[in-house]
Structures are given as C-alpha cells and as structure tokens.
Image (cartoon, grey):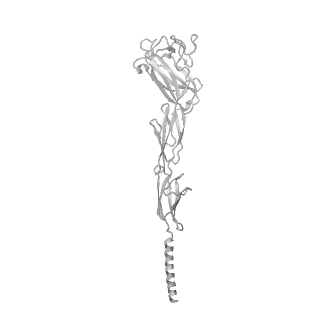
C-alpha cells in the first residue's frame, strides 16, 4: 500500500508537469507592429500607407474619413485636406490580443485651377474659379501676363489665344495649371459706302451732296462744291483709270471736310479704331479724324491725325494705310460716332491741281 501511494504521487506530478507544458505551448502570441505613410508628390490628398509587424494574421485600416482597407500597403485618397486620425489594427491568432496603432495624418489641399471669361470685343474679363488657391499667374497667349486674381485684358488684335492660369496654394501643395482657347475680335461698325462704290465704267467726278446727273453718293456729306469733292475711278496704283469698277473718294484741300455719321451710339469705355487707305494725286496732305454728334449738328472731334501720303509712299501716289485708335471720353457717351476726312495740302505749282487726295477702304471697328 505504501508503494502504491508513492507511485500515485509520482504519476500526478508527471501529469501536472505535462499539463503545464502543453498549456504553455498552446498559449497564443500577441501580434506587434507599426505603420508608416507617405503623401504623394503629385497629389497632396493621396497617401500611401505601409503596415509592418510580427505574429500577425491580418490587418484592418480606418483612415479617419469613413474609408477602410484590409491591405498591407493601401493607397487612400481623401476628398479634402485636414487632420485625420488613422487607426491600424493588427490581428493575431485566435485568442491573442490585437495591436492597435493610432497616428494623426495632416493633409494640405492643393489648388484646383479653373476660370471663366467674358469677351467684349478685344477686351476679355476673366473670372477665377480656382479652389484652394493663394496666388495666381496668368499667361494671355500674346506675350502679356498678370498676377491679378480676376484680370481684365485687352488684346491688340483679333484672334484665338491660348490663355493659361497657374494657381499656387499653401506651402507644400502642388500648383495647378489650366489652359483654354479664348477668342477675341473687334466688332465692325457699319460705314455706309466706305469703299465709295458706284456703278459705271467711265471716269466720274461726283458731288457728295445731291447731283441731278449722277444722284447722291450714299453715306457721305461734303461742304464743298460738286467738282471739288467726289469719287473717281482708279487703277491699282492710285492713278486715274478709264475703265473698271473701282472708285476712291476725291478731295481738294480748299474745300471743307467730308463726313460720315454712323448709326453707332457710343457707350462708356468703348475704344474705336478707324482704318483707311489714302493717296496723294497732286502732292496734297490729308487729315482724318473721329467725331461725335450729340444731335446738336456739331461735329465734336474725338481725335485727329495729319499725314502726307505722297511722302509716306516714297514720293508717289501709291496708297498708304493708316489708322487711328480712340478711347471714347465720358462726354461722348450717348452720342453717335462719325468719320471726317479732309485735305490740307499747300498750294505750290498749279493751284487748280495742288491739294488733291484720295481716300478708300474706310472702315471703323470697336474693340
């Protein structure tokens, strides 16, 4: 009996030892780990995360904006910048305690460029619609730039221009550049009979006012007699031709000016460009100008230019192109716009021939 008790005690001791050994061998190991993150250089709202650790079975991400993932290396893009609490949960074997790692991620909004525009002839007003912008650089596609947020730009001539806006945001953000084709064009103000077109194939000297033989020349009025101001058939070099259908306005300096009052009513801020061709027949100088008429019958001069086409054309009667650009003053607003032509040559040589000038292709634009 004594030996049996000793044997039982030894058996219990061995069994207890074995049970303790087995229990220790099956106890699960808690996982450990951490994570890193990197904000994308081309998108400051896109973040690449990477989990690391030991004794893990799976991972769960909570990106702090409602987004989740179970990937070891997820890339998550946020909608807007801000501070986000990112939680990584590392799961181990059944029965183990999960590892939870929490970090604050701060993101910066990069600008999202955009703009609209409204054209008023050659003047274009730009409206900046950029989000998260701090500073701006505009390239208007004509060599001109601006750093205004909402610039107003006047192009020198009609055309299609590629306008680019580069928006910069807060420090660390990625600049944004957007480009768009912008059309700018001068408007045309009707000048009645600006090319002095008349029917017929013979030389015609025509009065600007009523003439019983040839009738009126539309659009223009003269203060001279019927043989000093009119239209004449011409050839391509400006000399008188005896056939064809092209005509130019013929002016003598001893007469008053020719004038053409258009139907355009001047508005505030408008700019006008008068374009015309002039030639000298007999060494006469010329003057051309823009005026306005408020209805009182007076031609109020906006601006005027005196030129010498014969000299400008190399001492010849060839045609020379000229232009005059005028900004409408406040006192002209509401009045009608007009064109005035005049010869101002001096008399030397034959007084019956000096001071004759020709005008053609008279056009008026608004810009």
Left or right of residue 335, residue 51 in this image: left
3 is higher (above) or lower (below) than 273: below
> Is 63 or 314 nearer to us in this picture?
63
Residue at figure coordinates x 54%, y 35% from the top left: 119
| Residue at the left extreme, as displayed | 314
Residue extending furthest right?
Answer: 295
User: Is 203 or 176 nearer to us in this picture?
Assistant: 176
> 270 or 23: which is nearer to us?
23
Q: Could you say where residue 253 lies in the image, as x and y percent from the top left?
A: 48, 17
Q: Position of residue 98 (x, y in %)?
A: 52, 65
Figure disc tally: 0
Q: Is residue 251 above or below residue 80?
A: above
Question: Could you say where residue 16 lies in the image, as x and y percent from the top left?
Answer: 51, 79
Question: Is residue 183 shown to the viewer in this render?
Answer: yes
Q: Is residue 87 visible?
A: no
Q: Is residue 351 above or below residue 164?
A: above
Estimate the x, y position of residue 320 in percent, counting from the top left.
Answer: 44, 21
């Amino acid at each position: 009996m004594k030996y049996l008790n000793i044997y039982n005690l030894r058996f219990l001791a061995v069994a207890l030892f074995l049970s303790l050994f087995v229990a220790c061998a099956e106890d699960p190991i808690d996982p450990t780990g951490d994570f890193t993150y990197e904000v994308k250089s081309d998108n400051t709202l896109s973040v690449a995360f990477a989990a690391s650790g030991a004794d893990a079975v799976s991972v769960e991400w909570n990106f702090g904006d409602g987004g989740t993932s179970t990937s070891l290396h997820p890339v998550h893009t946020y909608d807007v910048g801000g501070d986000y609490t990112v939680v990584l949960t590392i799961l181990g074997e059944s029965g183990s305690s999960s590892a939870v790692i929490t970090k604050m991620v701060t993101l910066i909004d990069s600008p999202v460029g955009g703009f609209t525009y409204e054209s008023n002839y050659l003047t274009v007003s730009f409206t900046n619609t950029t989000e998260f912008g701090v500073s701006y650089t505009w390239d208007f596609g004509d060599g001109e730039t601006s750093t205004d947020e909402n610039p107003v730009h006047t192009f020198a001539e009609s055309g299609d221009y590629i306008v680019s806006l580069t928006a910069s945001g807060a420090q660390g953000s990625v600049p944004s550049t957007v480009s768009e084709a912008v059309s700018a064009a001068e408007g045309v103000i009707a000048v009645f009979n600006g090319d002095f077109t008349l029917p017929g194939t013979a030389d015609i000297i025509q009065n600007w006012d009523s003439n019983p033989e040839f009738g009126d020349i539309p659009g223009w009025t003269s203060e001279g007699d019927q043989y000093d101001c009119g239209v004449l058939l011409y050839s391509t070099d400006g000399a008188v031709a005896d056939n064809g259908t092209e005509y130019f306005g013929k002016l003598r300096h001893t007469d008053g000016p020719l004038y053409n009052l258009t139907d355009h009513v001047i508005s505030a801020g408008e700019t006008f460009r008068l374009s015309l061709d002039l030639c000298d027949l007999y060494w006469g100088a010329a003057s051309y100008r823009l005026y306005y008429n408020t209805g009182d019958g007076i031609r109020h001069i906006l601006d005027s230019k005196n030129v010498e086409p014969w000299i400008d054309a190399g001492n010849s009667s060839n045609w020379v192109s000229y232009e005059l650009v005028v900004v409408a003053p406040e006192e002209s607003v509401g009045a009608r716009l007009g064109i005035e032509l005049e010869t101002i040559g001096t008399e030397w040589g034959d007084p019956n021939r000096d001071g004759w000038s020709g005008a053609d292709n008279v056009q008026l634009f608004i810009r």
